[in-house]
Image (cartoon, rainbow, N blue to C red):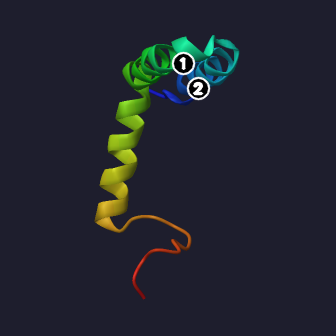
Amino acid sequence: MDYGATVISKEGELLVQSETCKPENFDSVWDEYVNALLASGGQKIIDEQREVYQEGAYRGFYPMAEK
């Protein structure tokens, strides 16, 4: 399943809500939307990317990688 569009949508909600909420509500709003983002496929994407990276099947230059 392609979670990308859903995660991008949730990411947008996270940014809007965390910027427009009252300062005293920031932490709870942030936690709520991060958890929603992870539950909507974000964690799956993180896990898949981590696995590919650890297998060495990635492209590009990573500045912190040992040479």
Residue assigned mark 1:
26
Relative to residue 66, is residue 22 drawn left or right?
Answer: right
Q: Quadrant of residue 6?
A: top right
Q: Label 1 neighbourhood size at 10 Å, few (<14), some (14-19), many (20+)? A: some
Residue assigned mark 2:
11
Report the amino acid beneath label 2: Glu
Indicate which disc, 2 or 1, sits on the residue closer to the N terminus.
2
Q: Nearer the viewer, mark 2 or mark 1?
A: 1
Q: Label 2 neighbourhood size at 10 Å, few (<14), some (14-19), many (20+)? A: some
Under circle 1, the secondary element is helix
In the rendered image, residue 47, in percent from the top left (x then y), is placed at 32, 42
Report the amino acid beneath label 1: Phe
Depicted 64 relative to depicted 53: above or below: below
Q: Quadrant of the C terminus?
A: bottom left
In the orientation shown, which residue stands out farthest toward the front? 24
Residue shown at 35%/68% (left/top)? 56
In the rendered image, residue 58, in percent from the top left (x then y), is placed at 45, 64
Q: Nearer the viewer, residue 55 or 21?
A: 21
